[in-house]
Amino acid sequence: MTKIGIILGSVRSGRRGGQVAQWVLERAGQRTDAEFELIDLQDYQLPVLTAPIPAMAARGVYDDERTQAFSAAIAACDGFVVVTSEHNLSMPGALKNALDHLYVEWNDKAAGFVSYGVNGGVRAVEQLKLVSTALQLAVVAAPVILPFATEFEGQAALRPGKAAVTSLDLMLDKVLAWSTAMSMLRSGPGAEAEIRARIAAIIDGIHAKDLDALRRIYAPDVVSFDVEPPLQHIGVDAKLKNWARVFTVFEDVSYELRDLSIAVGVDIAFGHAFGRLSGKLATGAATDGMWVRATFCFRRVGGAWLIVHDQASVPVDVLTGRVIADLEP
């Protein structure tokens, strides 16, 4: 079922946003065509963004546990309703900070806005529209505007009128419709392009002997069936240990991939190709290496496509047990 996250963007003490978000959640909960979940930024305590790698480049892989938890919550949603107040003609700093923490988790999803404030928070919505464009979020029309003077009793307790309720229902209709329609984008050509970019990053990381770059591409619990023993390498540390051993063998290493084919589902994808390591050995000798059969299994983790399983194999003569290493694609 389609899942919509209701993001509460204010973390201030005494905030009115809690009432607004609860109203949205209760109204949305009367629907049977989607699942709705409250995502309160106060629960995540995200630090001021200081990560050395921009979220656009991190592609869903983060060191900070708070960011990881927030990433998982956002990645699990198909669309969003953002509840925002207005601070100094813009959105709350905590909301902007949260948006900037992630990137791929927002991509190709729909968002609608519910704003409140002295003038209904309209300037916060305008700022959110600009940021959403950069995050590849599709903004639906007709935000829900809640001025203090007309929608809050004593400018404190939320008492939405009939027009506000109608506006919310319309906005929820649009968010759900767009989120459902855009699900094809998240498992279509865009997803395949991201996976191909991931595989290209593996090749770049091998050429550079960069274990940190490779770590960002594998899931923490990756299971690898490589041509070298043991039968399986479990976990990213074991996988990287194997690559580190390869890098000690080569002074200069090259990796070539041919005939890559990829099939993409909603949150899982498979690829297969022929791969070959070659280069200059630590002894000074050059080697052309051998062609192996390479298989990759990707899963969308925290909004990013990570390798959860890979396998490299070579044909074997069953009768003699001899590896056949001179075949070419």
Image (cartoon, rainbow, N blue to C red):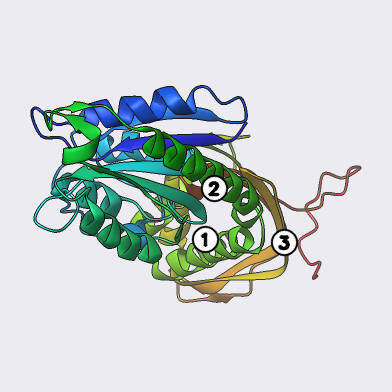
**Front-most of residues 127 and 223:** 127
Mark 1 residue type: Arg
Residue 233 position in % (x across, y down): 54, 37
Q: CA distance from mark 2 to mark 1?
A: 33 Å
Callout 2: helix, strand or loop? Answer: helix
Q: Are marks 2 and 1 in contact (CB under 8 Å)?
A: no
Q: Earlier in the sequence, mark 3 or mark 2?
A: 2
Mark 2 residue type: Lys
Q: CA distance from mark 3 to mark 1?
A: 14 Å
| Residue under the point 39% across and 69% down | 208
Q: Is residue 329 above or below residue 241?
A: below
Mark 3 residue type: Ala
Side of 325 relative to 167 (left or right):
right
Tell which tag, 3 or 1, sits nearer the viewer.
1
Q: Which picture quadrant has residue 139?
A: bottom left
Q: Earlier in the sequence, mark 2 or mark 1?
A: 2
Residue labelled with disc 1: 198
Q: Is residue 136 visible?
A: yes
Residue labelled with disc 2: 174
Q: Which picture quadrant has residue 272?
A: bottom right
Label 3 Cα neighbours within 10 Å, binned few <14 / some 14-19 / many ≥20: some
**Front-most of residues 213 and 59:** 59
Query: Could you tell me which quadrant the N terminus lies in?
Result: top right
Callout 3: helix, strand or loop? Answer: strand
Q: Is residue 297 above or below residue 133?
A: above
Residue labelled with disc 3: 273
Q: Is residue 309 above or below residue 100?
A: above
Q: Which picture quadrant has residue 103?
A: bottom left
Label 2 Cα neighbours within 10 Å, binned few <14 / some 14-19 / many ≥20: some
**Front-most of residues 148 and 59:** 148
Q: For the view shown, which residue lies furthest in the right direction?
A: 319
